[in-house]
Amino acid sequence: MPVPSRPQSVSAEVKVSDGLRPAEPVRTTVSALAALAGARVEAPTGTAEHVIVTGVDLRAQGIIEGDLFAALPGARAHGAEFAADALARGATAILTDDAGFALVSALGSDMPVLVHEDPRGVLGELSATIYGRPSEKMQVIGITGTSGKTTTSYLVEAALTAAGRTTGLVGTIETRMSGRRVPSALTTPEAPQLHALFAVMLEQGIDTVVMEVSSHALSLGRVDGIRFDVGAFTNLSQDHLDFHRDFEDYFAAKARLFAADSSVHAQHAVICVDDVWGQRMAEVARGAHAVVTTVATTPGVDAVWTAGPATVSPSGSQTFPLTTAEGTTLDVELRLPGQYNVANASLAVALCAALGVDPRDAVEGIAGVDVPGRVQRIDRGQDFLAVVDYAHKPAAVEAVIATLREQVRGRVAVVVGAGGDRDAGKRPLMGAAAARGADLLIITDDNPRTEDPATIRAAVREGALAVPESERGQVWEVADRAKAIADAVGWAQAGDVVLVAGKGHEIGQEIHGVKYPFDDRDVLGDAIERKVGGAQ
């Protein structure tokens, strides 16, 4: 698979305040966009033939001169209610539905309006066209699954860089391009921001983009209009059942990256088949007549790429053999601990091979990778292991505890909670998973958001106490997260491990709609320093 040629010129440095817009926008007529979308044009002045669009946004406050304003229906309000603001900011046209058109008409504006029964459904393709279809001029990798998306994307980015690619990264923690970092608000941005971002990346000389693709993004059309060269699947476990009807609906959302009837299905699929969901996803991809590469780390599971058992060092780093599609065995070194990271690393190397990268270069590139908030060690000179991890799903909590138990001979303390306004069904499962693995479980607040924190803690505690007493350790409840972390540190002795799970790289805690500064890594480090210094 050839690497697309890079643009000859590279634009000036992009600032976050610029809204991540390309320096040289494409000019598209409203009539051309209407024809593409199959939309009805309502043009009070008689024609939209010469009205030009150079950008698009679905937030009125994000509109700049020349934009198409996508006024979409919402759960609480219709976007067309903000059309006056969008027009004042320089919008040249509006995309909406009939209900939105009625609201816009009341303004008495002569702005052309594209009316479509499902404006969100066509927004991705329109955004791609408005920004010059940039994903078709780079190689784009989409990574989906419940756990491991972030880690796999970091590994892939490092491997591609080692192979000489100029890379972009779009993910949960950050967006990166040309060595600069842009904080991410969503795992996957909305379609207008995403295609604008791709256009900027293309101007910056980026030839390969690796991005996390959430089930929300696939369901809501945020990635519509993207051509994925390679799609990857990590695994599936319970999450987001507040958004999806059930587990099958969750699987179907992920399958949009691979299914024949999906406009965004990848040309080449790389799928971990360690679980039954991966095996099902491989069949979905084969049904789309895509090239399918399977990866397995479980003995006895048939796959094109297979990983052997890992040898783990006292520090948690590990080495394992990885057999490629050609039958060559590579010795992979990985700083990240855990069997699940063997799967993530194997998937990353196979992904790079699917793009034409020499697997040996990929293996060399991933050897030194650390991922923020993913089994991240906090060392302040203490005689016990302290770790922060993003595990916020039952399977992920269980896996990270098992990984840490392999590294230490002492006891394990786990500090964990559950997020508010999210899948309530996983809360007791989180408590049960943590209680089974910990010698001490401290249930605390995560991001309560708009819910009563005590109600969330009670559900986690119910699951923890449902585990027979002979199969679990102590269970404490400490509402204040900083105190809970300090209590775990105070409990720890030489050779023990303290795991603070759930928030990972996050730098805020949302309570009753207010986000307060809070970083588990800093709070844990400070608690350790107080203990080491004799203040605790």
Image (spheres, helix red, strand yellow):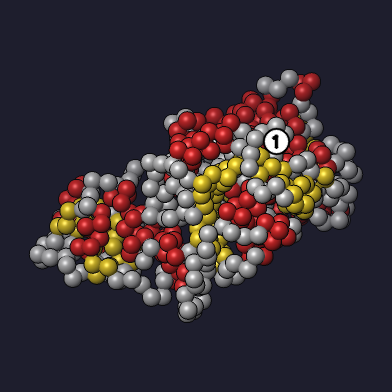
In the displayed structure, 458 sits above or below 88; it is above
Residue behind mark 1: 298
Corner quadrant of residue 262: top left
Q: Nearer the viewer, residue 404 or 248?
A: 248
311 displayed left or right of 368:
right
Q: How many discs mark residues in the rendered view?
A: 1
In the displayed structure, 237 sits above or below 88; it is above
In the displayed structure, 165 sits above or below 411; it is below
459 displayed left or right of 16:
right
58 displayed left or right of 206:
left
Q: Nearer the viewer, residue 324 or 159?
A: 324
- What secondary structure is marked by label 1? loop
Residue 166: x, y in percent?
A: 57, 68
Res 480 seen here: no
| Residue shown at 11% from the left, 62% from the top | 44
Crowding around mark 1 (Cα neighbors within 10 Å: few <14, some 14 to 19, many 20+) is some
Residue 240: x, y in percent?
A: 51, 37
Residue 53: x, y in percent?
A: 27, 67
Q: Nearer the viewer, residue 11 or 291?
A: 291
| Residue shown at 61% from the left, 28% from the top | 428
Residue 477: x, y in percent?
A: 69, 34
Residue extending farthest to the front is 326
Q: Could you tell me the amino acid type at mark 1?
A: Thr
| Residue shown at 31% from the left, 69% from the top | 54
255 displayed left or right of 76:
right
Res 319 seen here: yes
Corner quadrant of residue 360: bottom right
Corner quadrant of residue 194: bottom left
| Residue shown at 42% from the left, 61% from the top | 136
